[in-house]
Amino acid sequence: MYKLKTIENKIHNSDCTEFMKCIPSESIDLIVTDPPYNIGQENKRTKVGNEIISNKEAWGEWDDFDNKEFDAFMFKVMSEMYRVLKKGGILYCFTARKKNGFYCDYACNETGFTYQNTIAIIKNNPLPHFTKTNWRSAFELAFYVSKGKPKTFNFLSQREIINTIPYNIGKKIGKHPTEKPEKAISLLIRASSNISDIVLDPFNGGGTTTSVAKKLKRKFIGIDKSKEYCDMAEKRLINTQRELFD
């Protein structure tokens, strides 16, 4: 097992299913993460910068699994996240809106999490539907579950604590194709943790969770198997540090 002081406030370039095995049990206060949705193989299009490209071109191999392989992978991840969370610890996990992506059932029924709510981040300016054969996609979901009764819930205000969070796409900070808005991640962290708590993101990507945790004076642990994304997240942390001292 790692000693927490040796791994906290760092980005780790590793497979999260292996790295989390070495995090002490019941040591993490909050997990906020955005794992693969297993939709990279679909013939759909997304926006990266000013370009409209296919999902597969945008995301590559990290979001393209065999369905059975994906289920087994996510079960491992959910089991480890449950183990490392403290009693009363909280998980916010973004998920696809389709059955093979909505693994909240695994979290609650198979690994022991207690379902609390579902959060939707709402796109004020969703992309057009290019084939005009279905509804435009204007929201993403995250499920909110806990390890037993939540030990922390900061009801910030009636205005803020609403389970829909609006934002404008196109105002990204980094180049990660599925970057989540800082506003949403900040709200989740402020509501479900306190200063000096440890926030974990096993799929840290471009580093939104770790950057926001640092701004909010939380300790953090970020994990990602992509060296490119870890470098991106490290640069973002450096910029965050500069902002804090400006």
Image (cartoon, rainbow, N blue to C red):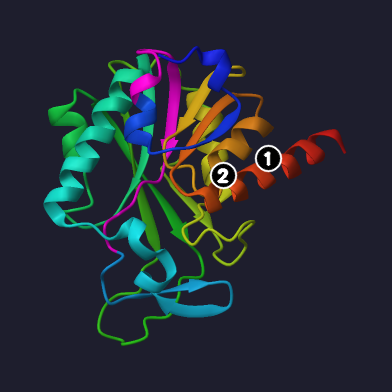
Q: Is residue 54 above or below residue 109?
A: below
- Residue corresponding to mark 2: 207
Contact (Cβ within 8 Å) of mark 1 with mark 2: yes
Instruction: Determine if the magenta segment contains residue 37.
Output: yes
User: How many numbered markers are drawn?
Assistant: 2
Q: Is residue 91 above or below residue 236?
A: above
Locate the C terminus by quadrant: top right
| Residue sitting at the far bottom | 131
Give the residues in magenta: 21-39
Mark yes or no: residue 160 visible: no
Camera-side residue of 201 and 183: 201
Q: Amino acid at mark 1?
A: Leu
Residue 182: x percent and y percent? 58, 47
Query: Which residue is pictured at 53% across the width and 79% down the height?
Result: 51
Sequence-wise first label, 1 or 2: 2
Residue 210 sits in quarter: top right
